């Protein structure tokens, strides 16, 4: 089996991380994988914001928790978050952002990091405070939050694979 297939079949969502920071070099490699994802009409709609500042990461986590009406850290204490937004000018922006997230999860796994896709980026980045924050960092396009990819070093073993639900493949010959 190719190493690409091995990575795809062995990747798992990680929900417990060590405190060790993720190097900028590794984050850049993961971002490159996200930017290389396929996109409709090659419009390259996804925008990726790397958040490693603990104070900002914690504010973003708290906003995410508030959206879901929960307490605690929905980012599982991961030290880094890659926020994926996508420009709404592309009709396929949600799919394009999703492909970027998928590529980045695979890249993180290949590089020895754990990751987990956390929803509610759309709801968080619809809020005026976060819209203003996006403008403050230079994002002026009309964007929608697609997902948050939390990154870090897994604290413990990767979760065991779950059995795959049958009956989802149909072959027409």
Image (spheres, rainbow, N blue to C red):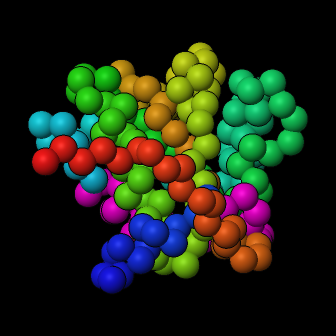
Kindly tell me whether residue 141 is visible in this rendering: no
Magenta segment: 14-36
The structure residue drawn at horizontal position 52% and vertical position 39%, both measured from the top left corner, is 147
Residue depicted at x 35% and y 73%: 5
Residue 72 at x, y percent in the picture: 86, 42
x and y, in percent, of residue 99 in the image? 35, 47
What residue lies at 41% left-to-right and 44% top-to-bottom? 168
5 over 88 or under it: above or below: below
Determine which quarter of the picture holds residue 1.
bottom left
Q: Is 20 a magenta residue?
A: yes
Displayed quadrant of residue 3:
bottom left
Where is 156 relative to 53, above or below?
Answer: below
Q: Quadrant of residue 138?
A: top left
Q: Residue at x 60, y 54 (%)?
A: 116
Q: Nearer the viewer, residue 167 or 78?
A: 167
Let me know if residue 22 is in the magenta part.
Answer: yes
- In the shown orientation, is residue 97 left or right of residue 27? left
Q: Is residue 137 left or right of residue 67?
A: left
Left or right: 151 with respect to 34? right
**How many labels sit on residues?**
0
In percent of width and height, residue 83 lies at 51, 44
């Amino acid at each position: 089996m190719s190493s690409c297939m091995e990575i795809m079949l062995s990747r798992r969502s990680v929900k417990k991380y060590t405190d060790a920071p993720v190097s900028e070099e590794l984050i850049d490699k993961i971002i490159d994988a996200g930017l290389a994802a396929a996109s409709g009409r090659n419009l390259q709609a996804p925008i990726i914001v790397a958040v490693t500042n603990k104070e900002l990461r914690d504010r973003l986590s708290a906003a995410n928790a508030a959206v879901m009406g929960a307490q605690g850290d929905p980012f599982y204490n991961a030290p880094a978050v890659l926020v994926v937004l996508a420009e709404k000018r592309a009709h396929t922006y949600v799919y394009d952002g999703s492909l970027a997230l998928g590529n980045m999860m695979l890249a993180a796994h290949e590089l020895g990091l754990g990751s987990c896709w956390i929803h509610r980026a759309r709801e968080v980045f619809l809020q005026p405070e976060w819209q203003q924050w996006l403008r403050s960092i230079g994002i002026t396009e009309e964007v929608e939050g697609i997902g948050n990819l939390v990154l870090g070093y897994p604290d413990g073993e990767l979760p065991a694979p779950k059995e795959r639900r049958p009956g989802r493949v149909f072959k027409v010959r």
